[in-house]
Image: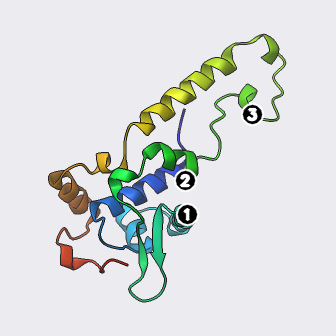
Amino acid sequence: MRLTQYTDYGLRLLIYLAARPDFAATVREVSDAYGISRAHLNKVALQLTSAGVLASKRGRGGGVRLAGRPDCILLGTVVRLLEPDFNLVECMRPANACVITPSCRLRDICKEVQSAVLDVFDRYTLADLVHDDAQRHAICRLLGIPAEEDSLRPPL
């Protein structure tokens, strides 16, 4: 099983924002920090904003920020929101064309695998990815964002 790049970008965006939960960032800042596509990241940010995971403000001094506390954002919720298709094999797809489906247990096993993966994501929140000040500062340093509170744009 593999998460899409779209979901990966969403999780990276949330980690960036969780490292500085009281501040906003632009999609440009985040895409530059990770070296990823701004256009794709913008689509992810729009979906997360529409779902209420992020809050956004347009214009000068605008950007996106977490809409809630990192410890209230379940990773499982985010993955379910962003992942378009968890159908691991043909027989799990709506247009299943596999001829052995009626006699095969593969679909049931794959559903169990899918459930187990999502259960693990459900045990963790965004705060677990940025769990202490040392880790938060390390993430900020690696992404090239200032660690001091007054160095980013203020909250939205």
Q: Residue 145: horizontal and vertical position, in percent?
A: 26, 68
Q: Amino acid at mark 3?
A: Arg
Q: Is residue 36 above or below residue 154?
A: above
Residue 28's label in the rendered image is none
Q: Which residue is mark 2?
A: 6
Q: Decide: is 16 above or below 61.
A: above
- Among all residues in the image, which is located at the extreme top? 103
Q: Earlier in the sequence, mark 2 or mark 3?
A: 2
Residue occupying image coordinates x 43% and y 33%: 120
Q: How far, Cα to Cα, is label 2 from label 3?
A: 20 Å
- Counting every numbered tag in the picture gives 3
Q: CA distance from mark 2 to mark 1?
A: 7 Å
x and y, in percent, of residue 31 in the image: 42, 66
Tag 2 and tag 3, C-beta contact below 8 Å:
no
Q: Badge 1 is on which residue? A: 40
Left or right relative to 125: residue 44: right
In which quadrant of the rendered image does the C terminus lie?
A: bottom left
Instruction: Say which of marks 3 and 1 sits in front.
Output: 3
- Under tag 2, what secondary structure? helix
Q: Residues within 10 Å of mark 2 (few under 14, many from 20)?
A: some
| Precedes in sequence: disc 3 or disc 1 | 1
Q: Nearer the viewer, residue 69 or 128?
A: 69
Residue 72 on image: x %, y % = 38, 52
Between 70 and 10, the one lying in front of the other is 70
Q: CA distance from mark 3 to mark 1?
A: 25 Å
Q: Which residue is mark 3?
A: 93
Number of residues whose C-alpha sits closer than 10 Å to that of mark 3, classed few (under 14), some (14–19) or many (20 or more): some
Residue at image x 48%, y 56%?
A: 10
Of 122 and 146, the residue lying toward us: 122
Look at 35% across and 63% down and name the residue there.
17
Q: Amino acid at mark 2?
A: Tyr
Who comes first in sequence, dot 2 or dot 1? 2
